[in-house]
Image (cartoon, rainbow, N blue to C red):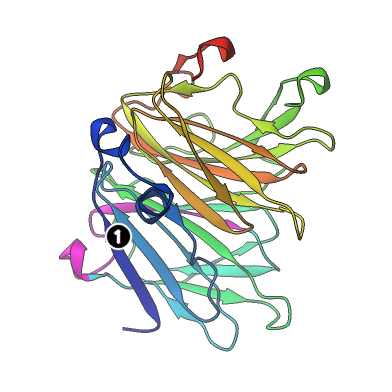
Amino acid sequence: MNNTIYETRYANGPASVKHYDTKALRDEFLIHNLMQSDTIIWVYTHYDRYMVGSAVPIKKSLTLEAIDPLKAKNFLDRRELGAINVGGPGSINVDGTTYSLGYKDALYIGKDSKNVVFNSDDANNPARFYLNSAPAHHAFPTKSVTKEQAKKLKLGAMETANARTVYQMILSGVVETCQLQMGMTELKPGSVWNTMPAHVHDRRMEIYFYFEIPEEQAVCHFMGPVNETRHIWMQNHQAVISPPWSIHSGSGTSNYTFIWGMAGENLDYSDMDTAKITELK
């Protein structure tokens, strides 16, 4: 196996999490070690068997390989994969076809793909591929989606500090998938709140990956049941796991961008139970 590091995270229920201190909360839900040079990182979660990771090829190409928990010959024998580039120009070769990805471009890779190789165009400005993967029952075609090709939603307002643009990239209507959904949300300068009012969706889990956080700034991510929330302070290029029973919302000390990824039994983006801001505790 080439430079691949992985760990397993087991599912946690709300009754247990209410007793966690800060360290326990961060150990269970914060993913802090992404974007390591010349390494593929994976966290295998037991929330819908979702996987989150990264690949940063600098001195060499990086080949996607199955890790032991998958019990498979090839990584994508029973999975689908989404990648969004948050670094310099790069490419992903899938079974002999090369897909070029610029900054904030995405690639969906379907089930049964055998050979997946990550490359950077320039070692001095390497590609940084943020990766999400979910179990798949059907092989859909591999498809690239640029930021310009994404479906765009303008939400929020400057008056409530949550003016933002949502880019639906790997989502029904843009790319056909089994259950994986990915996209990106950019906050406008002067806005700091994402996904507010907060919501939960019990039929699917979600992971946020925060980036474009300026140096010396941070994002405070809120999670937990509506009536008993917790928070995790996050830095650039960190991700956080959101169980189906938890809200997922954040506020930064400046504007920033985040990538959201989801999986579960429902592909309806609007399937959510919204909580009134005044109900949060």
Circle 1 residue: 76
Q: Residue at x 37, y 52 (%)?
A: 133
Which amino acid, mark 1? Leu
Q: Residue at x 24, y 37 (%)?
A: 16
Magenta residue check for 80: yes
Label 1 Cα crowd, 10 Å radius (few <14 / some 14-19 / many 20+)? many
Q: Residue at x 74, y 43 (%)?
A: 253
Q: Name the one closer to the observer, 148 or 163.
A: 163
Reply above or below: 93 against 165: below
Image position of 180 (left or right of 102):
left
| Residue 102 picture location, percent across and down | 69, 60
Q: Which residues are magenta?
A: 68-85
Q: Residue at x 55, y 40 (%)?
A: 221
Badge 1 marks a residue whose secondary structure is loop
Quadrant in the rendering for residue 78: bottom left
Q: Name the one closer to the observer, 158 or 124.
A: 158
Magenta residue check for 39: no
